[in-house]
Structures are given as C-alpha cells and as structure tokens.
Image (cartoon, rainbow, N blue to C red):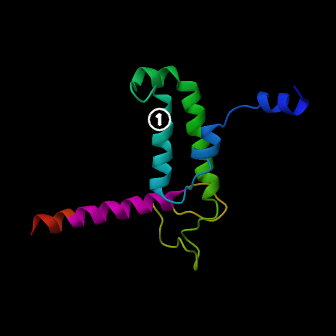
Amino acid sequence: MTEEKKKESKESPINWMNEFVLTGSFGSAYDFLNSIDLIVRVHSGPPSHPSWDALLANQEAFSKAITRCILRAVYSNLDADTVTDGSEWQGMAGAFPKWAGNPGFSHLIWGLEQLSKDVKEYKKNRSQE
C-alpha cells in the first residue's frame, strides 16, 4: 500500500456536526432552533428508539455540540446591529439591544416575537370567519 493510500485510509469519516450543523446558516431563529433540534435528536439515541436516558448518557458530547452551536450562532451574528442608524437590523431588538461586534443574537428573538404576533392575528381572523 502506498503512503498516500495509507494516509487516506486513516482519515476520519465526515464529521456531520462540522460539515452540516455548524456550517449552516444562523441568520434566523428557525435556523438556530433547527440546529439545536438536530443536535438533540442525534444525541438521543437511534432514530427508531430516541430516549431521555440516551440523551443523558450522551450528555458530555451533547453539551459540547450545543456549546459549539451557540458559539457558531454568536459568531455568525457578530455583525448584527439593532441600534445604529442604517443597519439592516435597526429596530429589531429582541430581549436586548445589539451592537455590531458584540456577542448576542437578540434580533433573532425579535423575529420569533413577530412570528408569534402574526400567528395570533391569523388565528383571531380565522376564528371570526
């Protein structure tokens, strides 16, 4: 076996967390919550028998994956600014104002709040029909 083939055979398989979950978009609350849901599902055991016990058994790996996901979401949203005039996120402060360069993603929470209001309004209009 050549050195190149030996090296290829020793390479690890694709890391789904690095390749898929943490390279995804974190530009919306939906994206962020979807990534968290994927992490919970993977660490809860096989798809045919997910369980709370499996999640607890995988708690260390789960905790690391969730932490990396949160850090990635914070990093992906460092440019968000909900306060400065002219920012595309201006006025979209969720729980707290957010300035560019500061960690946080409260503008994602603002999006959820707006969605919740829209859903309530839709249900109210539908019940009046």
* Viewer-closest of 46 and 119: 46
Which residue is found at the position 54% from the left and 31% from the top?
Answer: 62
Q: Is residue 117 magenta?
A: yes
Residue 87 picture quarter: bottom right
Asked if residue 129 lies left or right of residue 91, the reply is left
Q: Which residues are magenta?
A: 105-122
Q: Is residue 91 visible?
A: yes
Which residue is found at the position 78% from the left and 27% from the top?
Answer: 10
Amino acid type at circle 1 is Val
**SS for callout 1:** helix
Residue 70 percent location from the top left of the image: 57, 45
Judging by the rendered image, the residue that carries numbered circle 1 is: 40
* Viewer-closest of 66 and 113: 66
Looking at the image, which residue sits at the far right? Answer: 3
In the image, residue 97 above or below residue 4: below
Asked if residue 113 lies left or right of residue 35, the reply is left
Q: Is residue 96 visible?
A: no
Residue 17 percent location from the top left of the image: 60, 39
In the image, residue 91 above or below residue 1: below
Q: Residues within 10 Å of mark 1 (few under 14, many from 20)?
A: some
Q: Is residue 37 magenta?
A: no
Which residue is found at the position 62% from the left and 54% from the top?
Answer: 103
In the image, residue 66 above or below residue 115: above
Which residue is found at the position 68% from the left and 33% from the top?
Answer: 13
Residue 7 percent location from the top left of the image: 84, 31
